[in-house]
């Protein structure tokens, strides 16, 4: 039995335009014709369409589907296993994103509500990049320190944030002064500033032993968004992020072990 394009579109759940696209791409062409010359799909065509729709549902491209269906040497099972692995990774990523969204909702519900004016008053030029926050949450989703940091941040009041940002501003001014004066990153003044930064994190967010502080400082070099939370772009100098990273590493080596709390 043969079927017209319209009939196949209706019972297969695809548009006529899609069927024409498959035809033009050489993926599925009607193999029969009616007495009036209209192109018709036969049983073999429908079986091929079913396979195409199956692979499309799994996310294969049309090129990949054509290779699987038309090349006798192609191992369809290997393609399916590879796709299964990718889908599993995507499912895990989406689950983590759902957790991030849930935590963000919790922060919005329990955190202090600030007007735009209050946010500028408290945070000034420091802007928390939502894309960086999401990436960081995904990266450290299994970290107890990340969970504690998020919970404590959500619990801070406006006055807490005012005090926190005041401390950070004074520290930042000293860091810029030390850098501009040419003090070595491994010198005592720079290391003392690195230690102040470590203790600031511990005091306001989560315990920050030297090894964790090293990883945070390495992030300053790996992602400009991370360093922008410490020094806004308008105040940054070339080489400042690397300077801070070296100072943190030098201070961690000076402390040794877990360091002071």
Image: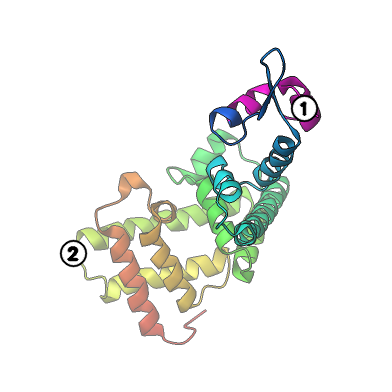
56 vs 159, nearest the viewer: 56
Residue under pointer 1: 2
The percent position of residue 20, horizontal first and vertical second, equals 61, 25
- Mark 1 lies on a secondary structure that is loop
Q: Quadrant of the N terminus?
A: top right
* Secondary structure that dominates the magenta span: helix
The percent position of residue 31, horizontal first and vertical second, equals 65, 30
142 drawn magenta: no
Q: Give the quarter of the image for residue 227.
A: bottom left
81 vs 255, nearest the viewer: 81
Q: Is residue 137 above or below residue 116?
A: below
Q: Give the quarter of the image for residue 33.
A: top right
On residue 202, which mark appears? none
Residue bounds of the magenta highlight: 1-21
Mark 2 Cα within 10 Å, few/some/many (few <14, many 20+)? few
Residue under pointer 2: 182
- Mark 2 lies on a secondary structure that is loop
14 drawn magenta: yes
Residue located farthest toward the top when viewing the structure as drawn: 36
Residue at 51% x, 45% y is 122
Q: Is residue 169 left or right of residue 98?
A: left
43 vs 229, nearest the viewer: 43
Q: Is residue 155 above or below residue 9?
A: below
Residue at 19% x, 61% y is 181
């Amino acid at each position: 039995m043969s079927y017209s394009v319209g009939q196949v579109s209706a019972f297969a759940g695809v548009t006529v335009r899609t069927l024409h696209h498959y035809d033009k791409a050489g993926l599925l062409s009607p193999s029969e014709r009616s007495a009036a010359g209209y192109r018709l799909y036969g049983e073999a065509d429908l079986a091929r369409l079913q396979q195409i729709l199956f692979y499309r549902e799994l996310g294969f491209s049309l090129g990949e589907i054509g290779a699987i269906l038309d090349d006798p040497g192609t191992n369809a099972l290997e393609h399916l296993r590879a796709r299964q692995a990718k889908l599993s990774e995507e499912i895990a990523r989406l689950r983590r994103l759902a957790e991030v969204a849930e935590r963000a909702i919790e922060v919005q519900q329990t955190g202090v509500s600030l007007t735009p004016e209050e946010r500028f008053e408290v945070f000034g030029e420091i802007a928390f990049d939502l894309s960086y926050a999401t990436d960081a949450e995904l990266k450290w989703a299994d970290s107890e320190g990340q969970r504690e940091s998020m919970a404590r941040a959500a619990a801070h009041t406006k006055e807490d944030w005012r005090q926190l940002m005041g401390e950070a501003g004074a520290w930042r001014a000293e860091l810029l002064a030390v850098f501009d004066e040419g003090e070595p990153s491994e010198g005592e003044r720079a290391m003392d500033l690195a230690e102040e930064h470590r203790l600031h994190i511990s005091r306001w967010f989560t315990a920050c032993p030297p090894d964790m502080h090293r990883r945070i400082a390495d992030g300053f070099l790996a992602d400009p968004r991370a360093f922008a939370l410490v020094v806004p772009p308008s105040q940054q100098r070339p080489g400042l992020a690397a300077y801070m990273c070296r100072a943190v590493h030098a201070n961690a080596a000076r402390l040794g072990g877990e360091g002071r709390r």
